[in-house]
Image: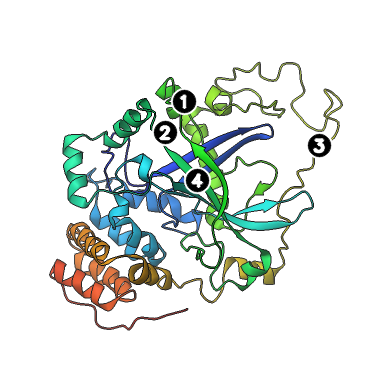
Amino acid sequence: MTNSEKGSPDTERDIRGLSIKFYTEEGNWDLMASSFPVSYIKDAKMLPDLIHALRRDPHTNLKSATSMWDYLSLNPESLHLIMMLFTERGTPYSYRFVNGYGVNTYSMVNNRGEYVWVKFHLKAMHGVRSFSASEAEYMRSRDSDWAQRDLVMAMRCNDFPQWKLQIQVMNDTQAHNFRWNPFDPTKIWPHNEFPLIDAGMLEFTQLPDNYFADVEQAAFSPENTIDGIGFSPDRLLQGVAFMCSDAERYRLGANFDQIPVNRPICSVFNSQRDGAMAVDGNGGVSPNYVPCSFNGHSTRKHHDKEAQYPIDSNIMDIFNRNENDDDHYTQPRWFYNNVLKDNEREALLKNIIDSMRYIGSPKREEIIQRQLGHFYLIDKEFSHQIADGLSVDRKEDQEPESNE
């Protein structure tokens, strides 16, 4: 989650994470997924400030709608996620009824070095089910651990949750011709252009023997990949790959990968030694460098199954920026007008008003008007309804734009 903390009610409006560790003969692969297909931000350098804005105010130690909406209104790339989060999808019924999305773009490479770009999806086979805002509020007071309890009860009744693993594939030519930056995690790849391809089925069949050992000590990072799966010019992915592992070193110690839940099933040879909780013999008598003349490691294995994309300036300009890079409105507008039903639009409107009404002085009017301006570029009437609900002046000084 982004806004919640350990101990927060399970029905809090927030992003849900769905991370899976695959233990393969080539090492561990961590598939990290979110309950929404897009991110608040497109660049990892913005992540610390985003987290600070969504967490407790350093002065009052309270969650602050003022800080949250101030930050989001100053970063319109967050608009796509906001429009999804404040629907009832932001309060899922339980963990069994949530889809997962890899959000970031990865590469897949065959043994000839031919690569494609991919996005991962996890489709809940139980279907998607959500609480309304009032139902979520009621459940917060009745059972703050509802989602966890529902999962445990279902497992004990052998009603095992299942997710279908699917991928979207985009080749290099399509990436160059895509009207948006294909590596922008605040945007989706339309399913009618890049259809979902079935890749497997995941079934959750066993509760952990010990929650702390198998869940609290689990460490996930997108840098944990295997041959054939790699990275992309996605700036958020590149930063998070470092940040996640760095956070785990702080949380669990330098040798967190020696904890049983994080330990690969295959043999591992690396040059990491010492540090707290080095419990694997610390490499024994083996030298702590490669290549070396001992133990059959006289040569360094070349990891050649990576996307060998060109990095000349013209190519990277296309990957990292194009004329539509700052189009933060077309996809949210499509979501609002073509994906949501009337009752879902009504719930979205009410939920946003209920959140924004807690924006406080002295910048209340400025923050609200700035955010209304973004909503105006999605739908004029939608912006006006929010203004009326907040009893503030309507935004009238700009016309919707389209970069389609």
State the quadrant of the N terminus.
Answer: top left
Asked whether residue 269 is in view, the answer is yes
The location of residue 333, given as percent across then percent down, is: 37, 72
Residue at point 39% right, 53% down? 50
Label located before the other in sequence (1 or 2): 2
Q: Is residue 293 left or right of residue 307?
A: right
Above/below status of 359 relative to 245: below
Q: Amino acid at mark 2?
A: Phe
Q: Amino acid at mark 3?
A: Arg
Disc 3: which residue = 300
Colouring convention used in this rendered image of the protein = rainbow
Q: Amino acid at mark 4?
A: Lys
Disc 2: which residue = 160
Between the C-alphas of marks 3 and 4, the distance is 37 Å
Q: Could you tell me if the residues under marks 2 and 4 are in contact, i.e. CB atoms within 8 Å?
A: no
Label located before the other in sequence (2 or 3): 2
Between the C-alphas of marks 3 and 1, the distance is 33 Å
- For marks 3 and 1, give the one nearer the viewer: 1
Instruction: Give the quarter of the image for residue 227.
Output: top right
Label located before the other in sequence (3 or 4): 4
Q: Name the foreground residue: 359 vs 131.
A: 131
Label located before the other in sequence (1 or 4): 4
Q: Could you tell me if the residues under marks 2 and 3 are in contact, i.e. CB atoms within 8 Å?
A: no
State the SS at label 4: strand
Disc 4: which residue = 164
State the SS at label 3: loop
Residue at point 50% right, 66% down? 190
Q: Is residue 44 left or right of residue 302?
A: left
Instruction: Give the quarter of the image for residue 280.
Output: top right
State the SS at label 1: helix
Q: Which mark is residue 214?
A: 1
